[in-house]
Amino acid sequence: MAVPAWRGWLRLLPLVALVAVSLGLLFGGITRWFSVDQLLASRAYAKAWVADGFWRAYACAYLAYVGTVIVSLPVSVVMTTLCGFLFGPVLGALVSICAATTGAVVVFSIGRTAAGEVLLRRAGSRLGRLAEGFRRDAFSYVMVLRLLPVFPFWMTNLAPAIFGVRLRTFALATLIGISPGAFIYASAGAGVETVVAAHQAAKEACLVAGGIACDAALSLRAVVTPQLVATLLGLGVLALLPVAWRRWRGRPR
């Protein structure tokens, strides 16, 4: 007995609901709470909250990060920077990597269950050939999409699902691909406190000396911290990764 066509479209409901929630949050202005200004304004409270219960805060940060990825809020960079600020460059990067991968796997699973087979079955032969080529080198394609943050995170979660990429391949490529950027942004977050502390010390010294424009007392030496230098070097290495990948792919076998 043939399955009614409308039942196939019912599988789209989880994805439609997810999109509706995402749009509602975006148009509701939730992203204004995920900004560097908010981070700086609430840094003392956030640090006290972490000091009061480190692993509780760590678990909450993980769950909050997973939630932002599932509803596809464009705040991954801010969340990773915040995790680095709260937990340090290593632990901050690790929780960001785990949370982003978990959220990506959830969105991937919803997309594959809801839309993958339906869209491919109704698509033309051109999209079918594109999906087949994508699956052939799925690990490389997914990892490059993660290394090059050109496309939105939600798009790189759903496209492999629609193209029929295996879950294990997607998860592993995502885990590896987002790791360099996670450590870079977490290191930047860990350096925020150093910059702010240096600014405060310079301001107090300026006031003691009887200065007037003490808000401008932050020197370039105070800004260029070792963490920031490491971040810039990391960005340079990250920018060279696609070049190395293309050369490796093009070398004679």
Image (tube, helix red, strand yellow):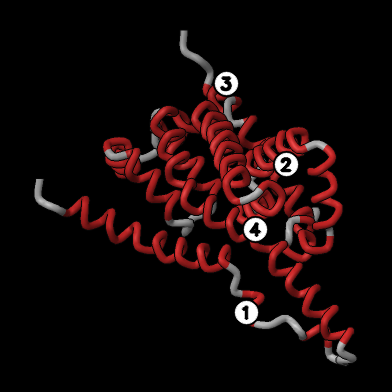
Given the image, on which type of amino acid does mark 2 rest?
Val
Q: Which is more toward the observer, 132 or 147?
A: 147
Horizontal arrangement in the rendering, residue 109 relative to residue 252 (left or right):
right
As measured in the structure, the alpha-carbon distance from the residue carrying label 4 to the one carrying label 1 is: 18 Å
C-beta proximity under 8 Å, tags 4 and 1: no
* Residue at image point 58% right, 31% down: 106
Given the image, on which type of amino acid does mark 1 rest?
Arg
Above or below, 193 against 20 in this view is below
As measured in the structure, the alpha-carbon distance from the residue carrying label 4 to the one carrying label 3 is: 47 Å
Q: Which is more toward the observer, 177 or 44?
A: 44
As measured in the structure, the alpha-carbon distance from the residue carrying label 2 to the one carrying label 1 is: 45 Å
Q: Nearer the viewer, mark 4 or mark 1?
A: 1
Above or below, 253 against 210 in this view is above
* Residue at image point 74% right, 56% down: 34
**Which numbered disc, 3 or 1, marks the residue that appears first in the sequence?**
3
Residue 247 percent coordinates (x, y): 21, 57
* Residue at image point 53% right, 24% down: 8
Horizontal arrangement in the rendering, residue 163 relative to residue 5 (left or right):
left
Q: Which mark is residue 21?
A: 2
